[in-house]
Image (tube, rainbow, N blue to C red):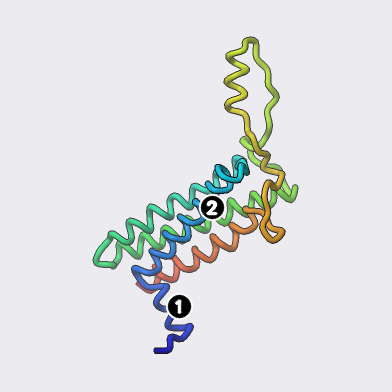
Amino acid sequence: MKISLGDLVRKATAMPYSALVILAASAAALAAAFTLQYVLDVQPCALCLMQRVPLWVAVTLAALALMARPYGKAARALLGLCAAVFVVGAAVAFFHTGVEQHWWLGTSGCALKPLGGADPESLREQLLSTVVARCDEVSWTFLGLSIANWNIPFSLALAGLAATAARRG
């Protein structure tokens, strides 16, 4: 049996496959981020952490879409929300790319703050809450692109998939 590319695309943009792809891709991206952080000791900056939020939201929405049987308006609405969430994720990744490239400044959470305190306990608290990684420095690359760079097309592709699936029903 021969499957055409068009058949494959139609199947991937239909429920439950679209929600499964969104859930699996988002979970894989989170697993990669945690592997970089906890196995390879690549510490995330504040914007890196912000880029994880849309992935967590997408995992939740896709799981809810899978549970919304029969797959109708509720599943379509959840996939539409996934599309919006991924557009936000792409925007955060684009902003982070701009900070890495020094096109603009990062958020206040990106800045390293000078330490100052009257007693050892306040210094300890400041050290524990200090940003470990800077947002304007690329901490890890793959094929010459940073994680934020890769997150832009990744998020836009999943936004397209989710939007198409939400429209198709």
C-beta proximity under 8 Å, tags 2 and 1: no
Residue at the right extreme of this rendering: 102
Residue 142 position within the rendered picture, expressed as x and y whole percent measured from the top left? 66, 58
Please determine whether, in this image, residue 26 is positioned above or below residue 42: below
Q: Quadrant of residue 152?
A: bottom right
91 relative position to 102: left or right: left
Residue closer to the observer: 152 or 27: 27
Q: What is the CA distance from the residue labelled 2 to the residue labelled 1? A: 26 Å
Residue 84 position within the rendered picture, expressed as x and y whole percent measured from the top left? 47, 58
166 relative position to 155: left or right: left
Residue at the left extreme of this rendering: 70
Residue at the front extreme of this rendering: 39
Residue 46 tag number:
none
Q: State which tag comes first along the sequence, 2 or 1.
A: 1
Residue at x-position 53% and y-position 46%: 34
Residue closer to the observer: 83 or 4: 4
Residue 119 position within the rendered picture, expressed as x and y whole percent measured from the top left? 62, 10
Q: Quadrant of the C terminus?
A: bottom left
Please determine whether, in this image, residue 132 is positioned above or below residue 165: above
Residue at x-position 60% and y-position 45%: 40
Residue at x-position 54% and y-position 60%: 155
Q: Which residue is mark 2?
A: 32
Residue 68 position within the rendered picture, expressed as x and y whole percent measured from the top left? 27, 61
Numbered disc 1: secondary structure: helix
Q: Nearer the viewer, mark 2 or mark 1?
A: 2
Q: Which residue is mark 1?
A: 9
Please determine whether, in this image, residue 26 is positioned above or below residue 8: above
For badge 2, the amino acid type reads Ala
For badge 1, the amino acid type reads Val
Classify 10 Å Cα crowding around label 2: few (below 14), some (14-19), many (20 and above).
few
Q: Quadrant of the N terminus?
A: bottom left
